[in-house]
Amino acid sequence: MSRKMPSRAIVLAAGLGTRMRPITDTMPKPLVKVGGQTMIDRALDALARAGVGRVVVNVHHFADQMIAHLARHGDFVTISDESDRLLDSAGGVVKALPLLGGTPFLLLNADSFWIDGESSELERLALAWNDDAMDILLMLSPLDTATGHNGKADFNMDETGRLSRAADRATGLVYAGAAILHPRIFAGASAEPHGLNLYFDRAITTGRLFGLPMRGPWFTVGTPEAIFESEAVLDRLGESP
């Protein structure tokens, strides 16, 4: 475990999962199993292996199912309940800030995961963090190692790791649903529904959005078809149960 590893993290797990219907008509997307394991457990296991001490998970869609499932993780997980109002990605983070503390924290999406190689991707991310230069550090996937993605790039990266939006979305890197964020970026924000792209763009403007390309395969599972596609790749990689 890196000594630079953030002690706290948030997993965004409150979305409605509309593209995953009809599966999500009866269950929340983070409880969908891919390769024999729920996506939320994949995220929590990755954080535990990296040495994170406490994880906040926000819930909304079928919140009762999520809360019951997360109870098995004990004190490792704290619930941020958005049952009354879905706050989108950034609004959910702002609501959870009192639980995340005043230092940089990890953020993971509950509907994506990756396979670590010889080194932990989260540990690499923590080692790359530079508090003086960065407000946000994104984990990025090359297009050719992304499974379940739409094939469009999100960012270009310069030789220093600084990011800009990909103008030609046929080339570049994909945001892989994991990041380190400094809570100072949310100064003055309220827990109203809004997305993280607002903060990504602000950090681009100030030159403080950076990225780190992954070394292994990445999976994003937003549709029923992506489950089968991901499981086929996992089987080919020998990562199936």
Image (spheres, helix red, strand yellow):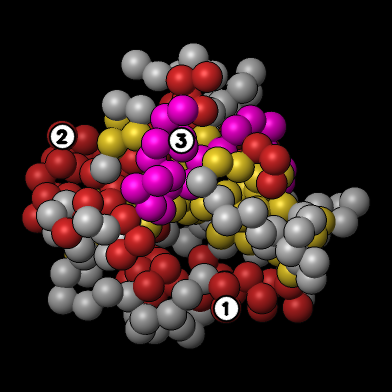
32 lies left or right of 236: left
Crowd tier of the residue under label 2, counting other residues whose Cα lies within 10 Å: few below 14, some 14–19, many 20 or above: few
* Residue 192 shown left or right of residue 180 in the figure: left
Instruction: Report which residue position mark 1 lands on.
Output: 198
Task: Name the one closer to the observer, 11 or 22.
Answer: 22
Residue type at the position of mark 2: Arg
Q: Which residue is mark 3?
A: 230
Q: Which mark is residue 72?
A: 2
Q: Residue at x 34, y 48 (%)?
A: 224
Please provide percent x and percent y for residue 52. 43, 37
Image: magenta residue range: 210-232
Give the tally of numbered discs.
3
Q: Earlier in the sequence, mark 1 or mark 3?
A: 1
Vertical comparison of 216 with 18: above or below: above
Residue at 47% x, 53% y: name it. Answer: 107
Residue 141: x and y in percent read 66, 45
Residues under numbered marks 2 and 3 in contact, where contact means CB atoms less than 8 Å apart: no
Element on which disc 2 rests: helix
Does dot 1 land on a helix, a strand or a loop?
helix
Report the quarter where the N terminus lies: top right
Numbered circle sitting on residue 2: none
Q: Position of residue 163 (x, y in %)?
A: 77, 62
Q: What residue type is disc 3 on?
A: Ser
